[in-house]
Amino acid sequence: SEGTWKATVGVAEHLGSDTFLHVHADGIGPLTVRADGSIGVQHGATVHLTPDATRIHRFDKDGNAL
């Protein structure tokens, strides 16, 4: 259980080669995370995330890219 951010899974969308996790990260808020399609997590699971700074897409409250 290591990672920079601790988060709780709200929804896990398994879409073949990718899985999109809609999580709530402690101290950060809601995030959408793209993961390997074989990841086995479900609603309510705790995950630990370490972001790749070169692949983060951030948006402001109006949906504009930062």
Image (cartoon, rainbow, N blue to C red):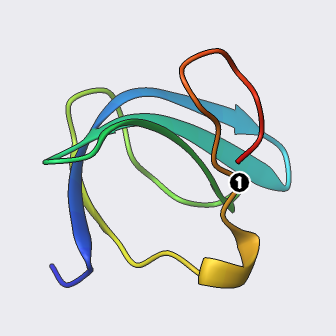
Farthest-out residue, top: 62
Is 37 situated left or right of 49 in this image? right
In the image, residue 8 sits, relative to residue 51, either above or below, namely: above
Is 17 situated left or right of 41 in this image? right
Using a 10 Å C-alpha cutoff, classify the residue at mark 1 as few (fewer than 14 neighbours), some (14 to 19) or many (20 or more).
few
Q: Position of residue 53 (x, y in %)?
A: 60, 80
Q: Residue at x 64, y 37 (%)?
A: 59
**Front one among 57 and 46:** 57
Is 14 situated left or right of 15 in this image? left
Q: Residue at x 67, y 46 (%)?
A: 19
- Quarter holding the N terminus is bottom left
In the image, residue 29 sits, relative to residue 4, either above or below, namely: above
Which quarter of the figure has residue 24? top left
Q: Position of residue 14 (x, y in %)?
A: 68, 36
**Front one among 60 and 38:** 60
Which quarter of the figure has residue 52? bottom right
Exactly how many numbered labels are in the figure?
1
Q: Position of residue 48 (x, y in %)?
A: 26, 67
In the image, residue 20 sits, relative to residue 51, either above or below, namely: above
**Front one among 29 and 11:** 29
Provide the secondary structure element on which disc 1 rests: loop
Q: Residue at x 26, y 80 (%)?
A: 3
Q: Mark 1 belongs to which amino acid? A: His
Is 13 situated left or right of 24 in this image? right
Name the residue that disc number 1 marks: 57
**Front one among 45 and 29:** 29
Q: Position of residue 5 (x, y in %)?
A: 25, 66
